[in-house]
Amino acid sequence: MSDDQRTLLLSAREGDHRAFAALVAGCDRRILSLAYDMTGNTEDAQDVYQEALLAAYRALPRFRMDSQFSTWLYRIALNQALRFRSRRGRQPPPEEWWPEQADHPTPEDLTLRGEFHRRLHQALGGLSAQERLAFVLCHHQGFKIEEAAELMACSVGSVKSYLFRGREKLRRQLGEFLEK
Amino acid sequence: MSSDAPRQRVLRYLYGDLSPEERAAFELQLEGDPALKTLLAAEQRFDQLHPVGSGPQLPEALLQESRMMLRAALRRQDRPGLLERAGEWFRRFMAPLAWPAGVAAALLVGFLWGRGGWQSPPSSLASLLKPEDLEVVALRVDHFEPATGQVSLVLDAVSQVQLDGTLEDRAVQTALAAALRGDLEPGTRLQALDLLQHQAHSARIRESLIHTLAHDDNPGVRLKAIEALKDLAKNEEVRGALREALQRDLNPGVRVEAIEALKHFNDPATLQVLEQQSREEVNTYIRGEAARALEGKRRAAGEQL
């Protein structure tokens, strides 16, 4: 943890909201994206984002300075997202905020992409919470398998197993797109 | 070795989980192993359709809105948990007492008003309210003396009051100015600004607009506040707020409005800020405007000589 972060953390512990906002500013974009990835819609993502960061704010006195603040924060966010998912059950249809991959997509590209993402979202809904989490962390959010293991508080072998199994399920569900 | 081992190796390769040596060995094997090549191609097809790192890209505005909502939630959280505390207090102290004793307790009542802490409402705002308009939504027990039954409560009360009048009416202005400083929806604050912007000649309204420009979380609201203030830039207090906005506001739109309002002024403090912005402003347009304003002033000074 850097000196700047330490100073901000100490101020945030004293109730300084601005210090807390500055402290989380480096990683809250990823937390929101992760929350969206796990919930599938912006309203729920904002709820998870807020619940996670409020929980982190309340838990600041228990944070050990010798560990990585962002990892601690992501772990809280993941737990909130998982709790939210188990409370919410089935998810509403996705909103389309996936990145474009072609510079000048044709209408056919867009239609195919839209359909692909709709089906991907459905297929993600069919994964177990751990499979989905491993896929979201490693495939969408770009975490290394080792980092995902730390966040999910499980072994590297387990993450691989969740990730590969989840990916295989997705491939089966999306077979028609892969053959095109 | 499991029959799925080659696929797992392919996936470890794609997710960057192989060591440099394992990676080199994998790529070497790939050249002479068509089955492995086919397996890799199949997995790569999935990655072409949905590449690693291609999570949803949420709009910036959504993040900003989430941050604003978080700040509001943090502010609310830091206020005392009134109902919880009151409930606990009543369980501890009131349960053993007979109800008549409770009824007989003298109540000292205060208000929670405004954002950020405990305070009495501005008397002019309080005068808009009647006791029967108020609904108690939270309560804090400040003090209780079991021996005498003396109790001091602080109430969080809300009220719905209809005000009819013109924008010139003091009561209407007071309510709108209070709304600007309250913890309300940005849309409500914008509505209040819409109504107040033509009343900015009033010192009270001007003060609220300056406060909004300096402290409101929402850039749209600050933009509206600066639009209302820029016609009053002859006032030094307003100019001070505009200079602060030009130097510190994170939103370029707000800074553009600030420089538009300030560039016609020649007082030393404004010139100093223009000078600084002509060197340090990150936005090209604003930096250019600051430089052009200074250049114009130098030219005018030269012509006069």
Image: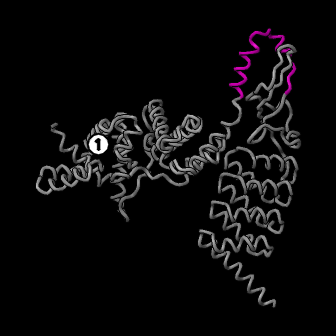
- In the drawing, does residue B191 fall left or right of residue A144? right
Badge 1 element: helix
- In the drawing, does residue A145 fall left or right of residue B294? left
Vertical comparison of A143 with B31: above or below: above
Total residue callouts: 1
Q: Name the residue tied to disc 1.
A: A167
Vertical comparison of B162 with B39: above or below: above
Magenta stretch holds residue B255: no
Magenta stretch holds residue B94: yes
User: Mainly helix, strand or loop, the magenta region?
Assistant: helix
Question: Magenta residues?
Answer: B82-108
Q: Residue at x 16, y 53 (%)?
A: B37
Q: Nearer the viewer, residue A30 or B194?
A: A30
- In the drawing, does residue B239 fall left or right of residue A179? right
Q: Residue at x 86, y 57 (%)?
A: B203
Residue A34 position within the rendered picture, expressed as x and y whole percent measured from the top left: 45, 44
Q: Is residue B108 visible?
A: yes
Residue B80 position within the rendered picture, expressed as x and y whole percent measured from the top left: 71, 32
Residue B231 position within the rendered picture, expressed as x and y whole percent measured from the top left: 78, 67
Q: Nearer the viewer, residue B127 or B46?
A: B46
